[in-house]
């Protein structure tokens, strides 16, 4: 079998999908056996992972122009001509019109453009609907990154659940092996993610400032992530110097594992996630979390986190206080999370399950 992966998101400044493709493509290559692998469009996996930049920032972006051109209906015959010999084409969210191939597959990462269109630009919502119509509906097989994402796709788009297999994301090995270490001056609660409205940072800041004074004297809230869409107001707040809050900006992959393992606890009150990489990474490190009781987060956490209504500042405050004042609870939840991540969130296991999916399709 010849599998062709659409790597378009690795050319862009992005986070979750880029993370997935970077590690997944390498894990697939390492476990492919007799299968062949190609990459679309005219690309190989990047040598390193940097969410804060894209290939287009370092080399001529002719590949991006080609991708845009091949997504135009008038130039679709060109796309068809330059990708011969594929058995399976696995499309990314950037693929709007897929070239004809024996088998078309794709990932369902999330349904935010349907559930929360206010958190996206009009152009992004339109593009997501085009991709769903031209790729998801045509595909012989789809991979959903959680049962939550699968259920959303079936409920909102009427997709046949028999065509959708749930295969979780993986976590890089350094998160499983990095020992907890003090990487800040004081103990800290960590939040990781792009600064954008869906990540709910402002309610986290509100909950944090309402904690008792002795807790604020003992712990920092450390927020790590690049600026995203509609982030100006939240960034301005982060940079005003709120008591015991530290904003690090983007943290590269090499340092993120140590930062996560060194945290006393992890806070991830996102309003919606198809999967939620930072939550799974905290679990791999054995770091207990407070996270949301919506979408995929209870599924991914699998009993290893305190769950809260992400719209409730009071619930978030109470959960943070409960976790920070109980060593035993943090140890219990951290151990549950680490065991679950070792069993379900290893990239080599994800790759083997993915190859079985492609073989079956």
Image (cartoon, helix red, strand yellow):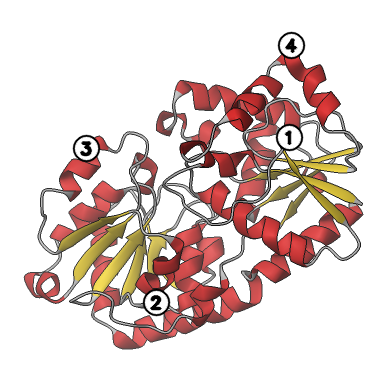
Q: Is residue 226 left or right of residue 111?
A: left
Q: CA distance from mark 1 to mark 4?
A: 21 Å
Of circles 1 and 2, the one toward us is 2
Q: CA distance from mark 2 to mark 3?
A: 29 Å
Badge 1 element: helix
Q: CA distance from mark 1 to mark 2?
A: 37 Å
Marks 4 and 2 sit apart, C-alpha to C-alpha, by 50 Å
Discs 4/3, front: 4
Q: Between disc 4 and disc 3, whose residue precedes?
A: 4
Q: Which tag is nearer the camera, tag 4 or tag 2?
A: 4
Q: Are marks 4 and 3 in contact (CB under 8 Å)?
A: no
What is the CA distance from the residue labelled 4 to the residue labelled 3? 41 Å
Q: Which residue is mark 3?
A: 233
The residue at which mark 2 appears reads as: 261
- Outermost residue toward the bottom in this view: 328
Give percent across and percent down for residue 284. 51, 75
In this picture, is 324 found above or below 29? below
Q: Is residue 288 visible?
A: no
Q: Between marks 1 and 3, how big is the CA–CA gap?
A: 35 Å
- First in residue order: circle 1 vs circle 2: 1
User: Residue 37, position in %: x, y?
Assistant: 81, 52
Is residue 274 shown left or right of residue 30? left
Name the quadrant containing residue 340. Answer: bottom right
**Residue 136 - label:** 1
Q: Nearer the viewer, residue 108 or 258?
A: 258
Work out whether mark 1 precedes mark 4 in sequence or the reverse, and give the earlier one. Answer: 4
Q: Which mark is first along the chain, 3 or 2?
A: 3
Residue 200 location (% of width, % of height): 33, 48
Q: Earlier in the sequence, mark 4 or mark 2?
A: 4
Tell which circle, 1 or 3, labels the residue nearer the N-terminal end: 1
């Amino acid at each position: 079998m010849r599998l062709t992966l659409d790597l378009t998101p690795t050319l862009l400044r992005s986070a979750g999908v880029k993370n997935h493709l970077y590690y997944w493509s390498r894990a697939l290559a390492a476990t492919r056996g007799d299968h062949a692998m190609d990459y679309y469009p005219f690309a190989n996996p990047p040598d390193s992972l940097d969410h804060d930049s894209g290939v287009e920032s370092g080399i001529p972006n002719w590949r991006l122009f080609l991708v845009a051109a091949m997504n135009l209906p008038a130039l679709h015959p060109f796309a068809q001509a330059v990708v011969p010999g594929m058995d399976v084409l696995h499309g990314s969210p950037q693929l709007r019109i897929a070239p004809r191939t024996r088998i078309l597959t794709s990932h369902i990462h999330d349904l935010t453009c349907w559930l929360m269109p206010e958190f996206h630009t009009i152009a992004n919502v339109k593009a997501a609907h085009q991709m769903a119509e031209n790729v998801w509906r045509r595909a012989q097989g789809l991979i959903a990154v959680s049962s939550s994402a699968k259920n959303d796709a079936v409920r909102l788009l009427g997709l046949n659940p028999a065509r959708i297999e749930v295969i979780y994301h993986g976590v890089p090995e350094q998160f499983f092996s990095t020992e907890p270490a003090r990487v800040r001056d004081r103990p800290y609660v960590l939040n990781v993610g792009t600064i954008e409205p869906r990540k709910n940072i402002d309610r986290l800041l509100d909950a944090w400032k309402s904690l008792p004074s002795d807790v604020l004297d003992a712990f920092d809230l450390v927020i790590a992530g690049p600026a995203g869409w509609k982030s100006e107001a939240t960034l301005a707040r982060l940079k005003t110097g709120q008591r015991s809050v530290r904003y690090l900006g983007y943290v590269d992959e090499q340092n993120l594992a140590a930062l996560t393992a060194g945290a006393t606890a992890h806070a991830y009150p996102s309003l919606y996630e198809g999967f939620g990489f930072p939550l799974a990474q905290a679990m791999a490190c054995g770091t207990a979390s407070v996270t949301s009781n919506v979408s995929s987060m209870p599924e991914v956490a699998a009993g290893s986190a305190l769950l809260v209504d992400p719209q409730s500042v009071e619930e978030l405050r109470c959960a943070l206080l409960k976790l920070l004042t109980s060593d035993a609870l943090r140890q219990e939840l951290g151990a549950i999370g680490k065991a679950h991540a070792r069993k379900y969130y290893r990239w080599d296991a994800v790759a083997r399950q993915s190859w079985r999916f492609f073989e079956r399709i």
